[in-house]
Image (cartoon, grey):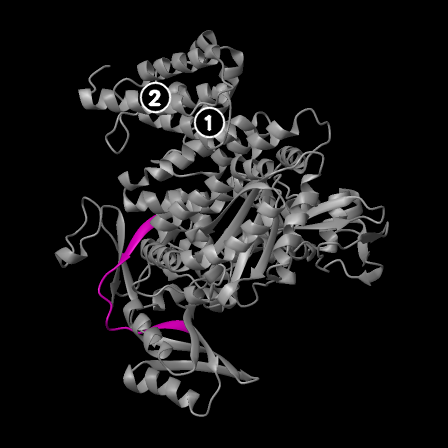
């Protein structure tokens, strides 16, 4: 086997045997021979290739094939394609060779996989144009996407072999697009693992801390869970149900996400553990009926939380997910989430799309997942949509939380959470959306901006003289509505941009200024825009004017007045840093204290301070304009995923002189002297200056926001710890500045 060592040959053979062992019984001997043939073909093709980790490359396609069959539940064609997925791209073999050996169907899948190669590779960055190619294949053969998701999952599992910079980029891509895509296709187990691994590499300290806390909580709660489950088992046994029931901790990322969304510490996340009941349906009784019967058995034992009932057996999610979720008060006053699923529902929940089709059988009814794929296909037909616009529209279609609404005739419409009456109008038909003037929701007149809830019945009111308005883009949530509205204004936008460009060029010519980098930087700062196109658009629409352009161009750039941190690039030919401890990796930007005239800006969206994990973004519109974001900033996440070529690695050096602005939020029990205690800890004990303080008290509870000057994250963390020790303080944390 080429120049592989004896140990490596054994490892490869063992990996293939593991693949064979997990093949489902339904795969015939003939198909097993096809898989063996594909394995040998891939083994020969990849030869001595190795991964970044140094292991034989052939182990990767074997692992992908194993995920495809064991964790997604796909059949022979998908397994063969997974084994061959990198052959055409990485070796001398062609698609014709694939067709000759494995037939036209396998060729088509490999062709689709080859077209989008690189998007999931662990040593490359995702580009939006490449991602668009990925989605193009979705409507052609969903197996291509499923195999690529398996490919991404294995790359994530082996991410430790890459540099920190690559780990962050790939984790960001995964969180931004691929985990939501896995969720949309119903691959819950894969989605959760992708999220967990991404968090592990993006926020290693946070991940480690939460992992330890959840593990500790699980050990403490094992006795509690057993006490909770025992009475349920008794009830199910009495009714002669065949079932499995177990308690499981929520995924680490899910807990972390909930902490971020609700601004809560770990100790205040009460539903860390969930109980799942999976039952074998009794014959001649609808599964939905049996789910609600089990629900009634549980409510005989425990009090249910009414606002936490999720009925996805009556109205399955758009990706096919079915289950009945409830939250009940368990022993010792603790809330416990209970999920009720049939065996069929569970397989669909775990394996998603593949299981969905397995159970769909010969039904002709169009499922919600089919409708979504059709919606994506329609979106792909949109003319003149840029790759960035496409990415944003597709992201909107990956909604996770859904509402179920109805037309006056009772036709069901599933929309993302937060959708408005205008979204509903566009979902019915584009022309109805264009002419909408209002709506009746449950027979009550409401504006187009009215947010809908599950169960709403909506009647759209139209007028022939109505046309789309610019502010509608702020009203709608769905990609379909946004795309339809944008298409109306596209031509007008082009005309406005052309007009704005001419206005600026004529003005600069009159003033004898050249349109160079310095000019645009000053204009960007003054008019609060990020690109030339945005500037031209505002000028063309007369949102801004050039009345004060002389003053704008003569003033010193804000960028040049920032004298807090300096930015310096090091490469092979760079000067040697001041100390070994500050030696950055090649291509890393070093953020130094007390440097004059730094060519960068600190992002307003996340307000990074020294000690934060940060990245730099180079503005393609201005060559020397660099914006520093926190690496976990949502804007940074989007930029890393869509414009990786403009992302720079950045590191802080020592930072003990200059103070920097940070914002914290604190709440707790209102008592006499609490304000004095807070200010005493901040100003006297820790010698931190307060810029501003806003405190509200209501019903014995106070809430406050404070802007403080700190040197770095270490100082800030010490401050938060000290404040949390104040008697009556419930929660204190750093927040992003708006």
Which residue is under mark 1? 69
Q: How many marks?
A: 2
Q: Is residue 705 above or below residue 574?
A: below
Q: Which marked residue is nearer to the observer: mark 2 or mark 1?
A: 2
Q: CA distance from mark 2 to mark 1?
A: 14 Å
Pointers 2 and 1 in contact (C-beta within 8 Å): no
For label 1, the SS is helix
Q: Is residue 323 above or below residue 93?
A: below
Residue 117: give x, y in percent of width and height: 43, 28
Q: Is residue 390 left or right of residue 413?
A: left
Q: Which residues are magenta?
A: 648-663
Q: Nearer the viewer, residue 714 or 580?
A: 714
Asked if the magenta segment contains residue 657, the reply would be: yes
Residue 707: give x, y in percent of width and height: 42, 76
Seen at 71% across and 27% down, the residue is: 363
Q: Is the N terminus in the top left, top right, bottom left or bottom right quadrant?
A: top left
Q: Is residue 704 above or below residue 591?
A: below
Disc number for residue 17? 2
Instruction: Farthest residue to the bottom: give it.
Output: 672
Asked if the magenta segment contains residue 208, the reply would be: no
Q: Nearer the viewer, residue 409 or 188?
A: 188
Residue 36: give x, y in percent of width and height: 39, 14
Is residue 124 shown to the viewer in this render? no
Seen at 18% across and 20% down, the residue is: 6
Disc number for residue 603? none
Seen at 44% across and 14% down, the residue is: 32
Residue 257: give x, y in percent of width and height: 47, 56
Seen at 13% across and 58% down, the residue is: 579
């Amino acid at each position: 086997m080429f120049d592989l060592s004896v140990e490596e040959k054994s490892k490869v053979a063992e990996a293939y045997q593991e693949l064979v062992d997990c093949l489902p019984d339904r795969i015939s001997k003939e198909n097993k021979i096809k898989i063996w043939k594909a394995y040998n073909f891939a083994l020969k093709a990849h030869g001595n290739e190795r991964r970044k980790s140094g292991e034989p490359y052939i182990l990767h396609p074997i692992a992908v094939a194993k995920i495809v069959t064991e964790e997604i539940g796909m059949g022979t064609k998908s397994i063969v394609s997974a084994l061959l997925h990198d052959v055409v791209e990485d070796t001398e073999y062609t698609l014709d060779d694939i067709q000759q050996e494995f037939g036209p169907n396998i060729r088509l899948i490999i062709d689709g996989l080859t077209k989008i190669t690189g998007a999931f590779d662990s040593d490359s960055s995702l580009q939006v144009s490449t991602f668009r190619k990925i989605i193009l294949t979705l409507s052609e053969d969903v197996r291509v996407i499923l195999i690529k998701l398996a490919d991404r999952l294995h790359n994530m599992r082996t991410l430790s072999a890459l540099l920190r910079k690559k780990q962050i980029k790939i984790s960001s891509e995964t969180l931004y697009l691929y985990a939501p895509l896995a969720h949309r296709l119903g691959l819950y187990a894969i989605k959760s693992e992708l999220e967990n691994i991404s968090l592990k590499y993006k926020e290693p300290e946070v991940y480690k801390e939460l992992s330890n806390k959840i593990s500790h909580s699980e050990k403490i709660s094992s006795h509690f869970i057993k006490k909770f489950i025992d009475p349920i088992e008794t009830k199910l046994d009495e009714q002669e149900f065949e079932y499995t029931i177990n308690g499981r901790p929520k995924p680490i990322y899910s807990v972390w996400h909930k902490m971020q969304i609700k601004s809560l510490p770990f100790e205040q996340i009460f539903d860390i553990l969930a109980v799942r009941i999976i039952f074998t349906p009794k014959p001649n009784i609808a599964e939905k009926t049996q789910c609600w019967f089990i629900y009634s058995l549980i409510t005989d034992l425990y009090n249910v939380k009414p606002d936490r009932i999720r009925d996805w057996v009556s109205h399955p999610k758009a990706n096919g997910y079915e289950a009945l979720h409830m939250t009940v008060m368990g022993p010792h006053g603790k809330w416990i989430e209970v999920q009720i699923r049939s065996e069929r529902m569970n397989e669909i929940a775990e394996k998603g799309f593949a299981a969905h089709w397995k159970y769909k059988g010969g039904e002709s009814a169009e499922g919600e997942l089919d409708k979504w794929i059709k919606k994506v296909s329609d979106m792909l037909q949109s003319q003149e949509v840029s790759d960035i616009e496409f990415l944003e529209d597709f992201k909107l279609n990956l909604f996770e939380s859904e509402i179920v609404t109805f037309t006056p005739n009772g036709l069901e419409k599933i929309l993302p959470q937060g959708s408005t009456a205008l979204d509903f109008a566009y979902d019915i038909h584009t022309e109805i959306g264009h002419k909408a003037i209002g709506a009746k929701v449950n027979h009550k007149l409401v504006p187009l901006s009215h947010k809908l809830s599950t169960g709403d019945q909506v009647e759209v009111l139209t007028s022939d003289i109505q046309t789309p308005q610019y502010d509608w883009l702020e009203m709608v949530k769905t990609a379909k509505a946004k795309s339809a509205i944008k298409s109306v204004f596209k031509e007008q936008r082009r005309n406005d941009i052309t007009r704005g460009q001419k206005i600026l060029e004529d003005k600069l010519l009159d003033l004898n200024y050249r349109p160079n980098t310095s000019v645009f930087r000053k204009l960007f700062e003054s008019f609060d825009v990020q690109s030339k196109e945005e500037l031209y658009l505002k000028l063309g629409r007369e949102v801004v004017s050039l009345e004060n352009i002389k003053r704008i161009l003569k003033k010193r750039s804000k960028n040049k007045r920032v004298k807090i941190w300096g930015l310096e690039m090091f490469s092979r030919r760079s000067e040697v840093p001041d100390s070994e401890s500050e030696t950055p990796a090649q291509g890393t930007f070093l953020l130094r204290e007390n440097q004059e005239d730094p060519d960068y800006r600190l992002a307003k969206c996340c307000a990074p301070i020294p000690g934060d994990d940060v990245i730099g973004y180079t503005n393609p519109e201005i060559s020397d304009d660099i914006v520093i974001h926190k690496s976990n900033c949502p804007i940074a996440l989007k930029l890393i995923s869509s414009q990786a070529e403009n992302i720079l690695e950045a590191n802080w050096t020592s930072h003990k002189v200059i103070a920097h602005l940070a914002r914290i939020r604190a709440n707790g029990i209102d008592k006499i002297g609490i304000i004095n205690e807070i200010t005493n800890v901040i100003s006297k004990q820790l010698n931190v200056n307060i810029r501003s303080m806003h405190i509200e008290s209501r019903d014995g509870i106070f809430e406050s926001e404070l802007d403080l000057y700190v040197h770095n994250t270490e100082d800030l963390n010490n401050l938060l710890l000290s404040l949390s020790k104040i008697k009556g303080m419930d929660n204190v944390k750093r927040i992003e500045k708006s």
